Image (cartoon, grey):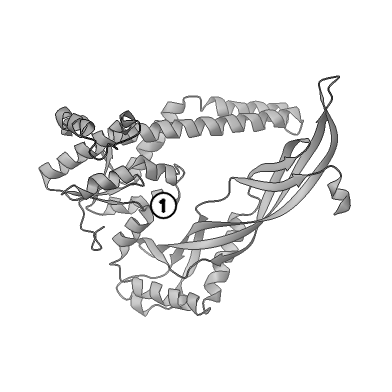
Amino acid sequence: MDENFEYDAILIDTSIFDANGLRLEKGLLSKLSQFKRSPIEIIFPDVIRGEVKAHLAKKIKESRSALEKAINDAGDHLFLKEDRLAKAKELIAESLDVDALAETRIADFIEAVGGTDFECGKNLEISALLEKYFKNLAPFAESGKKKNEFPDAITLLAVDNWAAANNKRVLAISQDGDWKAYCEASKYMECSESLSDVLTAYNKANPVYGLIGKLENAIEANAAQDFIKEVESRLDSVLDDFTPNQDADSAFYWEPEGCSGRFNRFELSTPQLRLIEHGNGFIVLELDAEITVDVEGEFSLSVHDSIDGDNVPIDSCTVEVEETFNSKILVTLAAEFGDGSENLEISDLEVEDVEVVSVPKTIHFGTLEPFQDEYE
């Protein structure tokens, strides 16, 4: 990837959307909006758009099913009144058109980042596509189901043809090795597997890097305690009462009865700071962190009655565990940045927001035993 970031366009593979949890409005994907203020074009081929839409629709269906189950459980256990239960179900009914919801989110995202729709069919020759297919040339692999690689091949060939016809330099972002292999042989395309690296390279020429260097040095010398405490306070708020899924082992039949987590502590895995975005009065830094949370889960235990065919409750238990996970965190800092930003000090920085990129979806609570609460 060119360190001076001399590209005319950016192409984002579906693998990058998936790697970022399809969170179009949050995290690193949302930071692509800064390109709307630049001459660099973000192109969205119809093939990629279709794949992302399909993945979004699946995610929406899964989320809606989980919400429906939670609402029905609330009604069954009588802690949600009938009128409120009906209103909650109405909200779900309003979101029945999954494809429309997925399409709306994609359209809003493309608008937010100033993206451009791209028709692959107008920039592709079928004979060139078939030649690569039969010769096992990238992005077609020599083994495996090559038909699954047609979407990638269509996208890359079309974008490459467009770049050649318009003398454009395109930076592709993908975690797919076949994309990398194709771009290595292309005159007009390069490939990076990290969206974070791309955003950092794009922002590297910013004069605020001198201040970031000061902050890095202070962190390494354990002299940035105010900054660390501000980040810690934000993490405490962000992770307050988060609700992961419950998992456990047991010789008995168990059911989850709810859990909640809270922030305990964090450490930076490295003092390295990456500038992800800068704007009028703010910058966004990416940090690698090791975060520890305390999670409390409630469970019911039962045994199967072979005569009646029912599960007979035998106990309920509450289990507390400490879980440590690694995640990138995005820290938004406010200050009077500008041409004189090299004169700013660390004390001039104010932490405005902290976002945890990868919060654990499931927590394992160990082995469940009946009456274990009595022995703790």
**Residue 55: x, y in percent?**
43, 34
| Residue at horizontal 78 percent and vertical 47 percent from the top | 318
Q: Is residue 303 visible in the rendered structure shown here?
A: yes
Describe residue 41's horizontal placement relative to residue 105 as left or right.
Answer: left
Describe residue 194's horizontal placement relative to residue 257 as left or right.
Answer: left
| Residue at horizontal 52 percent and vertical 29 percent from the top | 61
**Residue 13: x, y in percent?**
33, 42
Q: Is residue 11 visible in the rendered structure shown here?
A: no
Q: Which of the image's four quarters has the C terminus?
A: bottom right
Instruction: Report the number of numbered marks.
Output: 1
Quadrant in the picture for residue 216: bottom left
Q: Residue furthest top?
A: 308
Given residues 122 and 355, the one toward you in this image is: 122
Describe the element under mark 1 as helix, strand or loop.
helix
25 relative to 145, above or below: below
Q: Residues within 10 Å of mark 1 (few under 14, many from 20)?
A: many
Disc 1 marks a residue whose amino acid type is Leu
Given residues 298 and 351, the one toward you in this image is: 298
**Residue 66: x, y in percent?**
60, 33
Quadrant in the picture for residue 226: bottom right
Describe residue 254's horizontal placement relative to residue 192 as left or right.
Answer: right
Describe residue 250's horizontal placement relative to residue 155 as left or right.
Answer: right
265 relative to 174, above or below: below
**Residue 183: x, y in percent?**
23, 47
Q: Which of the image's four quarters has the N terminus?
A: bottom left
| Residue at horizontal 74 percent and vertical 39 percent from the top | 257
| Residue at horizontal 72 percent and vertical 42 percent from the top | 249
Q: Residue furthest front?
A: 143
Instruction: Name the residue tied to disc 1.
Output: 28
64 relative to 368, above or below: above
